[in-house]
Image: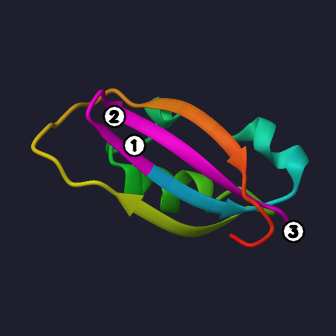
Amino acid sequence: MPKYKIFVEETVKLKHLITVECDEDIIEYIPDPDDSAGGEVSNYAYDMLDGIDGLTVLSVEEEIDCYDCDCFELDDIIPCKEDD
């Protein structure tokens, strides 16, 4: 199954990276992080994304910063290279 990296931007200075494994047709159903309950990237990854049938969250890299914001944006979803 292909792997994808999902970039989530919380503020200009704060980004998170979620690596998932799923079929290409599932990517179009990735929900917007703004719909995430609790407003945290880990909640978005493990509650929303991992709940999608056929999608597995492999890792969440959260950058810790002093900024606290309730608005998230789904920046980009890119396929991983074969060796990633």
Mark 2 and mark 3 lie on one chain; the one further toward the N terminus is 3
> Nearer the observer, disc 3 or disc 1?
3
Magenta-drawn stretch contains 42: no
Residue marked by disc 2 = 10
Residue 33 percent across, percent down from the top left: 48, 36
Residue 77 percent across, percent down from the top left: 66, 41
Out of 54 and 4, give the one closest to the viewer.
Answer: 4
The residue type indicated by label 2 comes to Glu
Rendered residue at 68%/70% (across/down): 84
Q: Which residues are magenta?
A: 1-16
Residue 30 percent across, percent down from the top left: 68, 41
Residue marked by disc 3 = 1
Out of 44 and 7, give the one closest to the viewer.
Answer: 7
**Residue 71, above or below 45:** above
What distance separates the C-alpha of mark 3 from that of mark 1? 28 Å
Residue at the limit of the structure toward the left, as seen here: 66
The residue type indicated by label 1 comes to Ala
Label 1 neighbour load within 10 Å: few <14, some 14-19, many 20+: few
Residue marked by disc 1 = 37
